Image: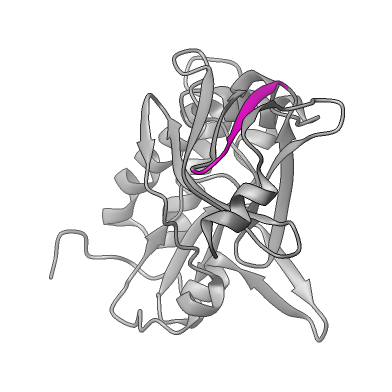
Amino acid sequence: MSTETIQQQVPTGTYVVDPVHSSIGFAVVHNGVSTFRSGFGAYEARLSGGENPELKGSVEVAGIQIDEPQLKGHLLSPDFFDAERYPQLRFESSALEVGEDGTATIRGELEAYGHGLAEKTEIVGLNRMFQLDLRRMKHATLVSCWAADNFVLPGRWVVSLPEVLWRAGAASVVGSLWQVSEDCAGQFVQKFYKALPSHTVDRAAQQAILALMRNGAGPPREPVDWAGFQVYGEPQKLRLGAS
């Protein structure tokens, strides 16, 4: 593409984004089989035209458009965006090309957490993970939001990260069907691995769940805090620390 074409598409001048006729959104592929979409309600951007067009902009992290309060709070917490310390995401283009149909391709650097992120990202889908040889993996514990979330496809095929790891060779997998707090997840993992030397995987998970339910000297926890943890595969006894 010639510079002359870009000049025709982006005349010399400075252009400010119109929030009434604009939107900023993002999409996240979840487990390789579904896409979560949202956006930001508060943002600004400036496009400088001419021989070397340039786009700069920022969004207010607190303006993320999510209706579910618990999910929004989690995303704004230090686990994800850490909005209190880093209230903005910023972008500055390094290259801007306009196609014949008027669609612009923009490359640049996205700044988050106070520093730039790499331009190139890679999505690893479940289909690629299924091709791995995990027969030497005795166990996997997944500590993340909805790590064991699943979809049932026509023919009753269950698609999920634990299912893929198990079918790729992992002997057993533990994960949660839904989001749990960092405190509960940490306690579960601690109790689970403490019980493993003398119990099979399923019994160790049961011991950890019971400990979460009882919550020591505190009030009993709600089912949402512990009922989501699931065990997949063969509930064998692990030899921790052995080769």
- Give the quarter of the image for residue 227: top right
Along the line of sight, which residue is nearer the eye, 47 or 27?
47
Query: Magenta stretch?
Result: 42-51
Give the main secondary structure, helix, strand or loop, of the magenta stretch.
strand
- Residue at position x 54%, y 70% in the image: 125
- Residue at position x 46%, y 18% in the image: 86
- Residue furthest to the front: 4
* 72, above or below 228, in the image: above
Residue 80: x percent and y percent? 50, 32
> In the rendered image, which quarter contains the N terminus?
bottom right
* 61, above or below 193, in the image: above
Is residue 183 shown to the viewer in this render?
A: yes
Relative placement, left or right, of 11 versus 134 is right
* 136, above or below 13, in the image: below
- Residue at position x 53%, y 39% in the image: 210
Name the colouring of the figure.
one colour
* 207, above or below 147, in the image: above
Residue 51: x percent and y percent? 51, 43
